[in-house]
Image: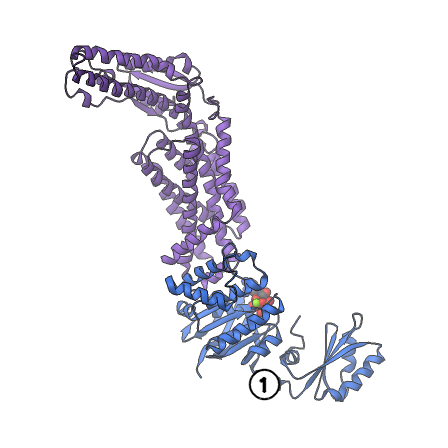
Amino acid sequence: MPAILEVKELVKNYGDFAAVKGITFDIQEGEIFSLLGPNGAGKTTTISMLSTLYAPTAGDASIAGHSVTRDPMAVRNVIGVVPQDIALYEDLTARENLIFWGQMYGLSGKSLNTRVDEVLEQIGLTDKAKNRVKTYSGGMKRRVNIGVGLLHKPRVLFMDEPTVGIDPQSRRAILDTVKDLNKKGMTVLYTTHYMEEAQELSDRVGIIDHGELIALGTQKELTQQVGQTETLILHLGENDDPEALAKSLDGVKDVLEAIATDHEVSVIAHEAEEVLAAVVTKANERGIKIHSIDIREPNLEAVFLHLTGRALRD
Amino acid sequence: MLKTIIIGFKDLRLVFRDRAALVFMLLAPFLLTIGMGFVTGRFSGNSGGIQDIPVIIVNLDNAELGDALVDVFNSEDLAELVEPATSSDPEAARQLIDDNQAAAAVIIPEGFTRSIIPAEGTMTDPNFAEADPISIEVYVNPAKPTSAGVIKAIVDEFVSRVDEGRTSGMTTIFQMLMTGVITPQQAETEGRSLFEDVDQTESTALTLKTDDEGAQAVEFDILAYMAPGMALLFLMYTVSYGGRSILAERAQGTLPRLLVSPTSSAQILGGKVFGIYLTGVAQISILILASAIFFQVKWGDPLGMTALILAAVFGATGWGMLITAFARNPNQVASIGSAIMLIFGILGGSFIDLGMMPPAIQFISKITPNAWALDGFTTLALGGGLAQLTEPIVALLIMGVVLFAVSVMIFGKKNLAQK
Ligand SMILES: Nc1ncnc2c1ncn2[C@@H]1O[C@H](COP(=O)(O)OP(=O)(O)OP(=O)(O)O)[C@@H](O)[C@H]1O
Ligand SMILES: [Mg+2]
């Protein structure tokens, strides 16, 4: 399958600050590709360059054969963009917004009206289409925000953290919409800092941190990087010191890695049972009460933890 | 081009959904006009601040009607309002106006009376009724538009009385002639006496305090000066509101979203400018319509009016763009915009008649669209047409073009997406 999107050594500096430090990846036609990374990793900056909003400091990318630096207009016709921050006219209704943005993508007349109806149906807002956007809930605004990106049936859709700050129900609806669009052949570049979303949606994942792509591949390939391991997550009380516990677990037999995060200690081992007893003993020795323990199969969170020593959520 | 228009109309629609903006654009100037109307006595029949208007009268006619007009200016009723001086040399009188010594010169040409009331024995001339009367010249001082307007109104009132008399008198006399009720000789005497009646009623008809029509005739000019003054003041609000919306669209993310759609920066910026322009034209048109309906303000020639509005909004939009190009965020546009609005309002004569300002201020006022446009509106209210508006219109267009060029240069240096 040919790559519909190719990114080569893309760099973006804001003054002295390097936000994106030369990232390279491809997306195949028909794929859902996730860029997973914590706040400030450079996800939005990357999307901004790919969508021709910002000129890259160095490097280039091509989408459906068009270079983002040399032929931005051609790129814009191929892509749909769902920005991280809702970008709508609040004093217009959902329908008026969709009509306006449709016109900006060159749609007009009857085909525009039909398409707007379809999109309203797709985002489940047919009933509320005549209300001004400012009267909508956060979730509804997010859905209109997505709808605008779909109007011209783009070949490649960029979605920048489209589920931030909304209720679980709307989030579910959005994830289902993404899968549905993908099934119909749309290529999707999806950014998120929720491991679960990347896990559920993506064919392939790029993990981005401090402007660098630190891992790239299918979920299976990525989790194999961590090795055949399991992660024990120890939930501690408010007053307990996860650092101290993590330190005491260093060097304990069969413990590969022990990392402290907020009120939690993640312990990586080949087999969870092999270290469980030792972990509990160490905690008791220090008078630390373990509230509960989760055992996780290798996942993207573990990959991130393994690669950076930090949790995805900051 | 199409997208530019769509963006412009989208902005117009958004303005009309923003209640706060509508209050400033339409309600505020309307209420202020009413307020100023009360202050200056537009609604109470008192001529208020305007008095002792210096006027120079040149009576070359020296016959019944010319003398009657001189009497009008010297009448008791107008004693407070005007301060007439007489001169026999029209050129000298015009020179005095050019030197800003008086508000207007009223030049009654030789043969004025004869052109209306025939001399004895000419009544039977079949061409007589068709002949155009010679008209009185009112040479106005553009620096004193309000005062000049008052003088113009007095003369207009006089002329229209004479005209009424002429038309109705002539019709009756011709009818009587045709039906053989009177002989041509009788007709002539009859006609002359008709006009003499007119003259006599004239001076009493033209009172300011007691007579309704007289008061209106004079004072509509005050509102015709104030209403556009207020409209222009708040036009500056509208253009800075529009400029602010460019930066607001960046902050709310719709500008970046436009930039990643297949729409060029030029189309987007053009659309925003077009939106400001449309809004300004809509605002001024609504205000003018409203003052015509509610205050019976007579704005004058519609064609000249249209051209003047289009040019005035163009010049003002240029200022809106310049403010926007310099500002970093929407709030800055708002604060710089309000400051400029007030300064231009004062400099441009929205509050105080420019004629009462020192020459230096009058000179500086030329950078404001307000001064030029107000000049144009006054010309229109004084009965001028498109032909007399060339100077303000050209000035406003040049102002717009220059400001646009400068703004585009500044915008070009900054990135539209990230300032
Ligand atoms: N216009 C800008 N000027 C200067 N620095 C910027 C600008 N935009 C972003 N940055 C910085 O660049 C880095 C990457 O930002 P970016 O928005 O791309 O991160 P992100 O991965 O999208 O984060 P988030 O999950 O919070 O959206 C951050 O440190 C941010 O502070
Ligand atoms: Mg982001």
- In the rendered image, residue B253, in percent from the top left (x then y), is placed at 52, 60
Q: Tell me the residue at 52%/46% (across/down).
A: B19
Dot 1 surroundings within 10 Å: few (below 14), some, or many (20 or more)? Answer: few
- Ligand number 2: quarter of image: bottom right
**Height in image: A164 above or below B388?**
below
Q: Colour of chain B?
A: purple
In this rendering, is residue B124 above or below A113?
Answer: above
- Is B333 above or below relative to B371? below
The residue positioned 58% from the left and 83% from the top of the image is A219
Of the pair A185 and A73, the residue shown nearer to us: A185
Q: Chain of mark 1?
A: A
At label 1, which amino acid type do we have? Lys
Which color was chain A given?
A: blue
Q: Is residue B388 above or below residue B44?
A: below
Q: Which corner quadrant of the image does residue B154 belong to?
A: top left
Q: Is residue A162 left or right of residue B214?
A: right
User: Which residue bears the numbered disc 1?
Assistant: A220
Residue B108 in the image: state x and y as whole percent.
28, 18
Q: Is residue A242 left or right of residue B69?
A: right
